[in-house]
Image (cartoon, rainbow, N blue to C red):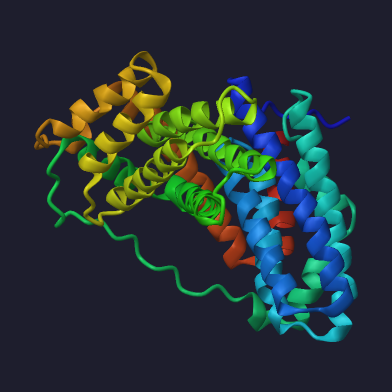
Amino acid sequence: MTQTQPQTQPQNSELMDAFLEDSWDALAHLDAARVRLSEDHSPAALEELRILSHRMRGTSAIYGYPQFARLAALSERMMEAGQHFITEDYPDLDVFLDQFSACARAAVERIAFGKGEGQVGLEFSSLGAASIVQGLITKHPKAFLLAPSPKSVVYSEIPLESGLNVQLQTFFNENAETWEYFAPEAKEHLEIIHHLLEQEGGAESEASMVQLFRSTHTLKGSAYMVGFAPMGLLAHRLEDVMSAVRDGGRPYTPEIAEALAIGNKTLSQMLEVAEGRPQSLESSLEASIEALEGLLGAEPMQELKELLATAHSPAISDPAATGSHQGSHIGHQATQMRLTGQLEQFFEEHLEIWGEFSGELRKHLEQLREI
């Protein structure tokens, strides 16, 4: 019997709840998009499936489930190639999606019960999905060619006028692979929050507040998980306000709407500063603290005030020296992510020969074990 390898899992139950909630939500939307695709083969349904696969890829990678992330990456690749498929290919694509959904759900269920993600790749292959993928690659090889990857840009020419800017940009420069997963998901949730706050009536309705809370909760969990602490800390305080409204502890007022809007803007600016685009982050963070302190009181704001003090401090000459304890943890995680990314890129760039290559490699490994 195959033994399940131990998995790296979030230790904090709140972070685990965020991962599970986001995963179940993505799978529910994926199944709905599958139905639409089977009915009309529309490019819009394919694009929605691609986005959902990308979302699951990022979330599972961030939370330390590499096999789930690789399976979602394969699904994302299939949806990208789907624009080149013809009508006769869609039954195979539907089977692929059915098997992907089944394996993904099984993985999330195991994770929910503390059993780790399991052997996701082996399960997927055992269902016959590998032959479907290979058949579509053989039929449409050009559809699976990877576009050249853009080179990473380091914005060293941007002046680092504060210690907080150094911290954010150092994280970006030293964690490129992590950022690739984290940033798109974070921006997606920030856009959802912005849309909910800008709609007529804001997030006054119960449904809107629940959705607002869910996106903020997921954003907070992802930020803490990858070590992007400033975003996690501010999102946590915004979540406290939303929680009070959602649970009936206080009404949704213009003051709350304004505080949430300022906070969301500040979170967006943190991403932009990290990527090297100058923003008035210090003044936005100060405005967020002032608005939130009027709602939550002084004590919950202490950590954010310390963060603001960091923003006021001058930039140091060696950005790598900031946050040495946290940097050690982030650096270790970044190394793991970098290696995972390199292996994943090799897999994606050699799908056509992977079956033959992996089979030969396993054969040689078995021979080495016998020596």
Which quarter of the figure has residue 141? bottom right
Taking the image as drawn, is residue 135 in sight?
yes
Q: In which quarter of the image is the C terminus?
A: top right
Q: Is residue 236 left or right of residue 114?
A: left
Reply above or below: 330 against 205. above
Taking the image as drawn, is residue 131 in sight?
no
Reply above or below: 256 against 329. below
Residue in the foreground of this view, choosing between 173 and 42: 42
At x 34% / y 21%, what residue is drawn? 301
Farthest-out residue, bottom: 86
Which quarter of the figure has residue 92? bottom right
Q: Is residue 253 left or right of residue 125?
A: left
Across and down, in percent, residue 208 comes to 64, 45
Number of numbered discs overlaid on the protein picture:
0
Across and down, in percent, residue 292 comes to 38, 29
Farthest-out residue, top: 299
Reply above or below: 271 against 371. below
Across and down, in percent, residue 365 comes to 68, 43
Residue in the foreground of this view, choosing between 26 and 322: 26
Q: In this view, does 67 lie to the left or right of 128?
A: left
Across and down, in percent, residue 23 comes to 70, 43
Q: Quadrant of the N terminus?
A: top right
At x 47% / y 53%, what residue is drawn? 187
Residue in the foreground of this view, choosing between 208 and 146: 208
